[in-house]
Structure formats: structure tokens, C-alpha cells
Amino acid sequence: MDFEFSEEQRKFRQEVGDFLEEELRQGAFEPSCDAWIMGHSPEFTRKVAQRGWIGLTWPKEYGGQGRSYIDRLILAEEMLRYGAPAACHWFADRQIGGSIIAFGTEEQKRELLPKILKGEAYVGLGMSEPEAGSDLASLQTRAIEDGDDYIIDGQKVWTSGGSHMNWIYLLARTDPEAPKHRGISEFIVDVSLPGITVRPIVDITGGVHFNEVFFDSVRVPKKYLIGERNRGWPQVLNQLDYERSGMERLMGNYPLFGALIQYTKETKRNGKPLSEEPVIRSKLAQLKIELEIGRLHMYRVAQVMDEGRAPNWESAMSKAYGTAFEQRLASTAIEILGLYGQLSPESKWVPLQGMASHSYLSSKGYSLQAGTSEILKNILALRKLGLPSQ
Amino acid sequence: MDLALSEEQEMLKKMARDFLTEKFPKTVVKQIEESELGYSPQIWKEMAELGWMGLVFPEKYGGTDMSFLDLAVLLEEMGQACLPGPYLSTVILGGLPILDIGSDEQKQEYLPRIANGELIFTLALNETSARYDAAIEVKATADNNTYILNGTKLFVPDAHIADYILCVARTSDGAKAEDGITIFIVDAKSPGISCTVLKTIANDKLCEVVFDQVRVPKENILGELDRGWGEVQKVIERAAVAKCCEMVGCIQRALDMTIDYAKERRQFDRPIGSFQVIQHYCADMATDVDGTRLSTYQAAWMLSQGLPCSQEVAIAKAWAGDACQRVMALAHQIHGAIGVTIDHDLQYYTRRAKAAEVTFGDANFYREIVAQGMGL
């Protein structure tokens, strides 16, 4: 056992922190919650790419750095701690690149990986459909072979990153006759192709990060089929393990926590800082404890990936745990702020730039994205604990 | 970073599991709980022969020079077996403080005899205030070459069978409560000591120990006069982690039992474990168990490395205290009525988990330490 980071890892954390401090100093970004999924900054992503921090864990032969998942976790942790706008590259770096490396052809790797590494491929995730949420395998979007192309028809919904994406990762049915898990294939599709319409969905924060995407006879060259035709299901399950694996499932609204702690130290009630009130100390300490427990879960997930396994039940556990924590954090923040907690980001008198009310609303989606907590607990119960499915 | 046990630790774990499973079926645990002694001298001797008492002592004191992390592995197994007896008292509360700050003579005198199973130790710390702060009121007054102890200690584990009691006493009134505290190694047979076993939820042997004009030779001071509190804090920290290790074993076993039960028990023509509500309860339990395990081993590893870890200990024990209650509540819910019968094994874990929650600092106590660590 060894719970410490190596000297090299500590230096790396410092390096990332220094970079982010400098960006902050130059006003390149404002720390914010959800910046990993909502903070789109092509400029920031380009800078991250220049440092080699996209594709950190990919093999060197594909332009990656061949570093460990623990290293990547350190990078993610710092990005999240600072609330840095990493949304342009986050999905591609986290799961699409890895999926192409695992299942793609050499041609796909040569075409797509450099785009991701340079921070130029903003990949949206086209999985859910109106009738295929938790039951993802019942998706109906069709991809029908026609000469050198597939013709794609259908609709995706809750497509994360849809407003900024230039590529969409797409799950579509290639064999309508086969049992539902056996007729699905994966594609990566250029969003500028004719027939694709993206329509934003406004979420309860008033923001837009997910979308409806319509496919109307979109011709996608066959070379953009990823992996085996009709074998997309096991491929996407693998990808979902990675999608759930990261620190963003615990620290997505971390900037709120830092700001809240500061607020209680600086705000006085009856002449005494809020932070000296026993109830408030207890609540904040409890959040800190829960955060640290969550970090250990996340480190375990990274270690599993470093052992070369997809983090299956481990990331199901860490994601369900982490998102519940994020929701408690946002809720507790409003409690502590009291009447001020309800103020919206643009309001007069709003504390903490409105992070509390924003995060409270936005965190409702955390336990739905990438597998609801219920689906994750099913995975845990069936795959880790061996409980019977019937 | 590496969160796995070493091969040697896995072997130690397996050996401990096999031994404890054989020696402590719940029928035996029950007999021991009901006995006056509260432990089995015969098995105690066998544990000593396995080298368990001296596990972390240096070889020159009859030990095997293993690490606190190795000890953590062993303690987890003891927790999963519901081992009754004075192991934690003797090794963690008695032996390790002597190893930390004892004089050469004291180490030579006591450690080899702890290691070979001859001596049982305990620590008399809590008083009627029932807190883990420095509000120590039991007094030790100097009188020539001796000190005279007076006052009442409470919740002293295994004092009724102890050969020696480390007694935390006030030797002077300093500016702060932490000053003026001294640890004495007291022969438990000294005249003036009376011991009453309290009846507890865990059926362990917590005692009231009354010191009435008890004379202790000056050379039995452990560490420095008036400056014992630092070591006491260290002991509390280490004992909290040791308790967490037992708690990990306790709730892991409760989870395993619950899953087995959910697979076997049929209602509505199917195993209850096939119902999602039961599955999700089990998933929640497993998440709590793993969080407890990860944070406990982090703290144990840091102690093992000699790294400062007050925050990590606080996080582990605060979390474990709360998590154990959630796990046991769900274990009972899933077991249904059979789980609340005295003949079912689950109750051994329920009772221990509740006692463990409040022992060596509860969640509120440690949340305050975490709050201080956050600069609040």
C-alpha cells in the first residue's frame, strides 16, 4: 500500500496549478462550477493541448504521453479545483480517444487522434434518445448501408456538448432484426454533414449544455464506423465505464465549496464569523469528510485503469457516491447562506457569484448523466455483489 | 499510489481468517461474552504463539517487527470474527505507548511479557465526563518516592483482568488542561484499586476503576512528568484507527451475511435479492463499506509510515462511525425479523458497531477536528 503521490506527481500537480494560476491572473477565465461540461473555451483548450495535457494517458505511438491514470486524475483534480473551462476537450480526452484507440482502425486513429490531441475536435455524445434513456439499448436511430456510406435517420437527445461540438459520437442501430443489444454500432460523425440539425435544450439553470440532435438521411462514409458492425453495445459499455470514472463526478462544483468556506470565515453574525458556529462547522466538516472519502473512491478507480482494466463496478460506485455528494454540497451551501442562498447569479446582493443556487439546480442532472444512480446501483448489485437478476 | 495489500499482508489476512473462524464460532463468542473473564485464556495463549501480541514490537522485545499496517489487517479480521478479549487493550492501549515513550527498563520489563501473552494491559483514560479531551481529574499526588492516585476512571476496557493499567492522571494544574498530565504504569493488584464491570451493549468488559490512595512508585511514570497528554493523544489516534479496522471487518461481514441472505431468502417466488430495492440497499452498504475501508487503510498506512495524520484519522473515524450505523440499519432491514433474534449472528455485529461508534471519539468529536483542520 502507498497512499502518497510520487515526487514527480507532486511536481506535476504544482505545474498544473501554476499554469492555472497564471491563466487566472491573466483573466483567461473565471472559476465556475460545471466548467468541465459547460465552460467552452477553444483558446483554453488549445493551451492545454500545447502542454500535452490532452491524451495524457494515451500511448506515445498515438501522440499521447503514456502517463498513468493517476497522473490524469491529478490534472483533472486541479482543473476542477480551479473551475477551469475545459469543456471543449473533456469528453474526447476522457473517453472518445480511448475508444478509438481500443476499437478504431489505423485510418481513424491517424485522422481523429491528432485532432483531439490538438484540442480541435469537440466531440458531443450522441447516446440517449427520447425512448432510450436508462434502457439505452432500445435506441431507434437507424444506420442503413448504402454503397460506401451509412444513411442515418433518427433523433438523439440530452446530447452533451451539442452546441459546440464539431464531431458527434453516435450510437445507431445497424441491424433492426437482431435482438436489441446485438444490432447496434458506433460511429463518429462530422457534425457539418448535411441533414444534421442541433437544437439546444434549456436546462433548469437557464443554461444550455445538452441538445436534441436530428439526423435526416445523413450520409456518413463507412470509414467512420468504429469497431465491429453490430458489436457497438459492448464497446459503449466499456466507454461508459470511462465516462463515469472521473473526478468531475465528485468535484464538478468544487469552486462552490472553496468559496463557501471562505464566505463563512468572512461573514459575521452577532459579531462572530459564521465559521465559529458549531452547526456550521459541523456541516462543513461533514462535507469535507465526504469529499475526502470520494477522492479515495476516485483514486481507486484510477488505479484500476492503471492496471489495464475498465473500471466497471468501481466507477459505478464512485459516480453514484460522488454525484450524491455534489448535490448535498449545493443544498448545504444554500442552507448556510440562508435567504441569500436563493439569489440567482445575476441578482443584486447575490453571494458567491450565485454559485450556490446555480449549482443546486444544475446538480440535479449529475445523478442522471452517464447512467442514473439507479442503473449504477444495479451494476454494483449484479456485477460486484452477485445478486440475482431474477 | 497503490491501494492494494501486499502479498504478505494477504497471507496474514488469510491466516488470521482461518484461525479466527475456527476458534471463534459464535457459540464460543457467546460463551465468552457471558463469562466473567470475557476472554479465553487458552486461545489468548495460542494467539501469542502466533506472534500476534508482539506483531509490531521490535525483535529484541520478543516481537516480529511488523508494521502498523500489518496490524491493521489483523484487526480487521478480529472485527469480522467479533473476537472478544483484551487484544486492543493490551497491544494498542498498553504495549504501543510503552514502546513509544517507555524507558529501556520499562520496555525490557513489559514488552516481552506482552508479546508472549503473559501480561494483559489496559489504559484508564475516560472519567465521568466521558470525553476524550484533557479534562482529567483523577489526581496523582507526590509523596516521597511514590505517587498516590485518587479518583474514578470509567469505561476502562478489560481492567478486571488486566495485570497493569496505564492510568492517565493529573499531577499538576497548569495554564492549560493539557499541561500537568502524567501517565502511570499501575500494577492492577495494588491495594486501593477496585474494579466493577459495567454492563454494555457490546457485552465487552468496560469497567469502572476506582483509585483510592493507590501508591505507585515514581519509576512507574511512563514518559515525562506533567507532559503525558501528547502521548495520550497519540494513543487515542492510534486506537481510533485500530477501532476503525475492527469496524471495517464488522461491516464487511454484515454486508457479506446480508448478501448471502438476500440470495437465499425467497418471497413472492423469487430471491429477495432480485428486487431492486434490496439490490440498491446492498449497493449502498457496499459503498459505505468501501469508503470506510479506504479511509481506514489510508490512516493506518500513514501511521505506519510515521506521517502526521490527525486529519486522516479524524476523517476515517468520523466516517466509520456514521457509515457503520447506516450499514447495520440496512443489514437488519434486509434480514427481516430473523435478524433481530438473539440466536442470529447479526446481532453480534449490530452491538459492536454501535459501541465502536462512540469509542475513541465519535463523529462529532472528529468533525470538530476536521473543522479545525479546515481553518474554520
Image (cartoon, coloured by chain):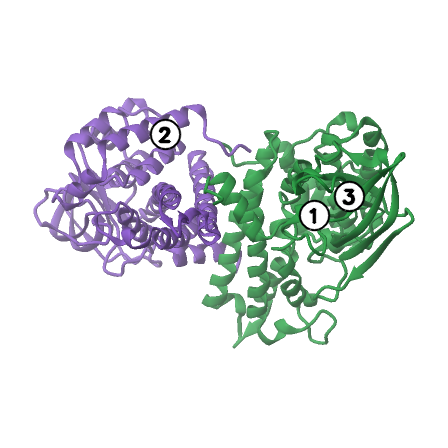
Indicate which label's residue lies in the foreground, 1 or 3.
Answer: 3
**Alpha carbon of mark 1 to alpha carbon of mark 3: how far?**
24 Å
Q: Nearer the viewer, mark 2 or mark 1?
A: 2
Q: Colour of chain B?
A: purple
Q: What is the chain letter for disc 1?
A: A
Whole-percent x, y for residue A234 in the image: 65, 36
Distance (Cα) linking label 2 and label 1: 39 Å
Colour of the chain lettered A: green
Q: In terms of depth relative to the viewer, which is nearer, A60 or B104?
A: A60
**Label 3: chain?**
A
Q: Which residue is mark 1?
A: A79
Residue A82 is at least partly visible in this image: yes
Q: Tell me the quarter of the image containing the N terminus of chain B.
A: top right
Residue behind mark 3: A169
Residue A241 place in picture, x, y as percent: 63, 40
Q: Nearer the viewer, mark 3 or mark 2?
A: 3
Q: Is residue B369 left or right of residue A303?
A: left
Indicate the quadrant where residue A359 lies.
Answer: bottom right
